[in-house]
Amino acid sequence: MKRDVFQAIADPTRRTILALIALQAMTPNALAEHFNTSRQAVSKHLKILVECELVHQKQTGREIYYQLEVTKMKEIDNWLAQFKKLWEERFSQLDQVLLNLNTKENEK
């Protein structure tokens, strides 16, 4: 089953995992040290992130390291950018309305 990337990043633990591995590749044991949870719970979160292609695994000897999939994160950023632009325009319009109201109030 292909999971939705936005459901994956909606979870605060998974967002924290993404933030941690954005700095450096980490093993599940190293990641588990940052949480008050079991390694198995962290592994379940990693499985979801892998399924959503937000992270990928790299085997080095006996260890599996998880790394951020920058390309997928860029796709999410590009998709969100359209909404950011829309909201910035709306806030700019609101600023102008408030400025006009303030000017009219001061003229009285």
Image: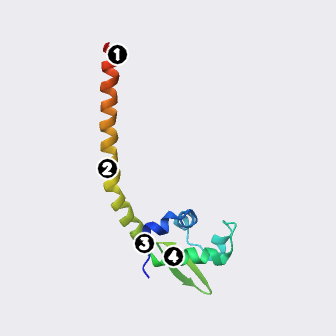
Residue 45 position, x and y percent, is 56, 73
- Above-or-below relation of 75 to 99: below
Residue 85 position, x and y percent, is 31, 49
Q: How far separated are the C-alphas under marks 4 and 3?
A: 9 Å
Q: How far separated are the C-alphas under marks 3 and 2?
A: 24 Å
Mark toward the start of the polypeptide (4 vs 3): 3
- Above-or-below relation of 32 to 83: below
Q: Which residue is mark 1?
A: 106
Q: Quadrant of residue 39?
A: bottom right
Image point (55%, 84%), residue name: 59
Q: Amino acid at mark 2?
A: Lys
Image point (52%, 81%), residue name: 58
The structure's colour scheme is rainbow
Q: Quick one: quadrant of the N terminus?
A: bottom left
Q: Crowdedness of circle 1 by 10 Å Cα count: few (<14), some, many (20+)?
A: few
Q: Which residue is mark 3?
A: 4
Mark toward the start of the polypeptide (2 vs 1): 2
Q: Is residue 94 left or right of residue 50?
A: left
Q: Which residue is mark 4?
A: 48
Q: Which residue is mark 2?
A: 85
Camera-side residue of 105 and 36:
105
Mark toward the start of the polypeptide (2 vs 4): 4
Q: Are marks 1 and 4 in contact (CB under 8 Å)?
A: no
Residue 57 position, x and y percent, is 52, 80
- Above-or-below relation of 90 to 45: above
Mark toward the start of the polypeptide (3 vs 2): 3
Q: Amino acid at mark 1?
A: Asn
